[in-house]
Amino acid sequence: MKAILITGASSGIGCAAAQAFLDMGWQVGLLARRASALADVAGGAENAHVLVLVADVSDAEQVREAFDLFQHRVGRIDVLFNNAGMFGPSAAIDEVPLDAWEQVVNVNLHGMFLCAREAFGRMRRQDPKGGRIINNGSISAHVPREGSVCYTVTKHAVTGLTRSLSLDGRPFDIACGQIDIGNARTDLLEDLVARARAAGQPEPATMDVESAVKAVRLMAEMPLSANVQFMTVMATKMPYIGRG
């Protein structure tokens, strides 16, 4: 039985992915800050293959303890879905409060680094060695939205993390890929839709979150001899090409 640890599992794409992998019979670790929300996700599972891991991804000690618990209970980590993230303020750079910038960096970049670090160390030492890390990037890892400087900068950095892990993981049979998801209908996107409505702008094109989950499943189920390095899955009519 394969095992996956999913960060940001209490809502959105993380929650939907968790339900999908539980339905597939995987051992699933649910990691997020909100214990009550994680309990709701775990409560929907009709099996004992789920483990709730309450932790803040930006806290190194909490992350280490969560990974220790998962490895102790399950035995190994086959896949990390490095998914936790936040958008932050929608504003020009001179209007972004420094504490808001630091919060986005701590979650989207520092947190993703910490989780990848813990997964990588365990994957290289487990028997049999190896595993897969799937980083949740974004369309904003390539081209930005207006007023998204915090989110865009961190997501560009995630691409560098993905490339480095892919190279450094080769001797240890650790594959790393990045999924860049555009306009999946989650709570985060609902906020953007609400902003568009408030500004009298057209609503953005969207897709069902299950389309994104199917892509994550494809990446996770591949043998370690193959890797999806980068995948872009998005609402067909969103203005990604030429968005600027």
Image (spheres, rainbow, N blue to C red):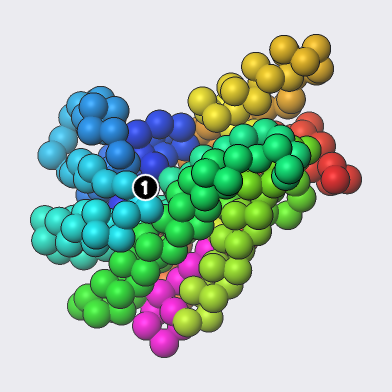
In the image, taking residue 41 as reference, residue 111 lies left or right, namely right
Q: Which residue is disc 1 drawn over?
A: 7
- Residue numbers of the magenta segment: 169-177
Q: Residues within 10 Å of mark 1 (few under 14, many from 20)?
A: many
Q: Nearer the viewer, residue 81 or 210?
A: 81
The kind of residue tagged 1 is Thr
How far across and down, in percent of the image, does residue 126 sit? 22, 76
Farthest residue in the bottom direction?
A: 171
Q: Position of residue 219 (x, y in %)?
A: 49, 56
What secondary structure is marked by label 1? strand
Q: Is residue 229 magenta?
A: no
Quarter containing the N terminus:
bottom left
Name which residue lies at 44% across and 63% down. Answer: 113
Vertical placement of residue 118 versus 26, above or below: below
Q: Is residue 181 visible?
A: no
Q: Is residue 188 left or right of residue 232?
A: left
